[in-house]
Amino acid sequence: MRISVHIIATMWLYAGRLFQWLHQRQYVLISKAVCAHQVHSSSTGFTDSCYNGLYPGHIHTTHIQKAMLAVGSGVAALHDPYRHDMVAVLGEATGHLALINLRDKMRNDPEGYTILKERPRIRLSTLDLSEMASLPDGSFGREYLRFLEDNDVTPDSRADVRFVDDEELAYVMQRYREVHDLLHTLLGMPTNMLGEVAVKWFEAAQTGLPMCALGAVLGPLRLSTSRLKLLFTSLGPWALRNGHRARCVLSIFYERRWAQSIEDLRQELNIEPPPVIVRATEKRNT
């Protein structure tokens, strides 16, 4: 026990030093702050030409620094899975190869290629909530809005990408984050721990991101016995099966499909409805 505590303390020490260095590194961007703010507030934040770095807020890190970030953020995320800031850093530090694969899938899909070119963002500033509220029940946009209301979440809670050293791959990661709640809607999963783990199993099979795989493996440790049984006998196999066979979920221009029936969209993506209904209890913003 003393050894494990010592190891964890050491990892936190080095991770803390690295985060301190990264905060100091951000002062280099101060001269670009006005431009970066303008870009951040727009829906095409990755393509504004006034910013001469890779993208607004980017912080370059070496392979060693990324490894330290992965360890520090991984320990923090393990301690508290709802630390989505640490989960975000973990994804950026470990996801390079998976992001390349996802980017290539998007390039090879006509709709995905359009997304890469137009760089849409899913934010409150880009959503017409009144129009979505006027859509009929069962439409994707109406069900997504209901998901946001029922689970008390907002698309603006997704952190901006900082540590991906490629502008296009950074957008792919940002797109993944911003469609996460859309996947909850498509899969019929709330934001409690069981729902999050089921979505992570789907995302692990679908994206190959190490962060998703880690969440899929460690998430069940926080489930009760009854929910663990439900995961392994029903929700887990369903999530893995659908994650493997579904069309690339990043290649869907969801913003142009709000009026589409959620059932039709599931069929198009080759996603089965959930085998059981998971109630939205123990709501947390994830």
Image (tube, rainbow, N blue to C red):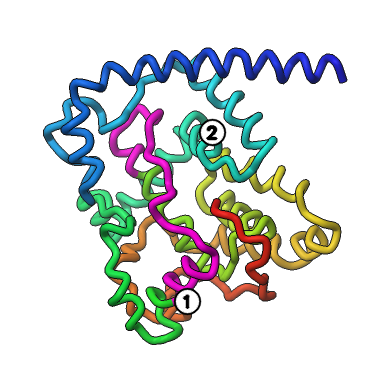
Q: Residue at x 38, y 31 (%)?
A: 162
Range drawn in magenta: 143-171
Q: Nearer the viewer, residue 30 or 263?
A: 30
> Residue 255: within the magenta?
no
Dot 1: element: helix
Residue annotated with mark 1: 267
Which badge, 1 or 2, comes first in the chain's sequence? 2
Q: Residue at x 60, y 52 (%)?
A: 200
Q: Nearer the viewer, residue 159 or 264?
A: 159
Question: How many numbered marks are there?
Answer: 2
Image quadrant where residue 122 sits: bottom left
Amino acid on which disc 1 is placed = Gln
In x, y percent, where is residue 107?
A: 30, 49
Residue annotated with mark 2: 90
Amino acid on which disc 2 is placed = Leu
In x, y percent, where is residue 80?
A: 66, 40
